[in-house]
Amino acid sequence: MRDWPQLDVSTVLAPSWVAFWMTLEAPARAEPFEAVAIFEPSGTLETYGLPAMDSPRVFGGLPARTPRLLPRHMHLAMSEVVPNHRNPDGSMCLWYPRDVPERRWTHDKGLISLAHIITNQVVAEDMVRAGHEWPLDEEGHGFPQDRRRAAREQARGRQR
């Protein structure tokens, strides 16, 4: 087993974003898969206070040879996602934005480090689809104030 995934990268540049398409291999998968990390420095992506270069929108586990879709059409390539570990647009929820930098990816760690995180997540999703428990660390989803607000709204709905 390799310490790092094999990495084959191509870059797509656009006026308002840059995408790094990666073909990755994982020991637990028979076939390579693709992932794309989309960076949108124009501010169109919510970064939760993090620099845009530290907040890519990542779609992973795509079948090999997935068409190079524009970021707004990536959901068309997604299938069989594990909803608790994906964002509403189908992108991967890879870390909690308010974690310290040591617990999340930052641009200075490089694409190989990001590829490693993506590969771990894809293998974990495969395990969940096979009926196993989620094998990685996880945080509650959303920010504390959002979870409190959702609980209040849910309680109000039950009172009506």
Image (cartoon, rainbow, N blue to C red):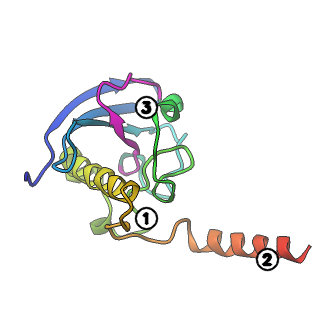
Q: Quadrant of residue 66?
A: top left
Label 1 residue SS: loop
Mark 1–mark 3 Cα distance, whole angstroms, equals: 22 Å
Q: Is residue 39 left or right of residue 101?
A: right
Mark 3–mark 2 Cα distance, whole angstroms, equals: 40 Å
Give the residue pinned by disc 2.
155
Q: Vertical placement of 11 versus 24: above or below? A: above
Numbered range of the magenta stretch: 54-70
The C terminus, quarter of image: bottom right
- What residue lies at 27% left-to-right and 68% top-to-bottom? 102
Label 2 residue SS: helix
Give the amino acid type for the residue marked by disc 3 in the picture.
Trp
Residue 69 falls inside the magenta stretch: yes
Give the residue pinned by disc 1.
96
Residue 55 falls inside the magenta stretch: yes
Q: Quadrant of residue 38?
A: top left
Q: Vertical placement of 149 versus 63: above or below? A: below
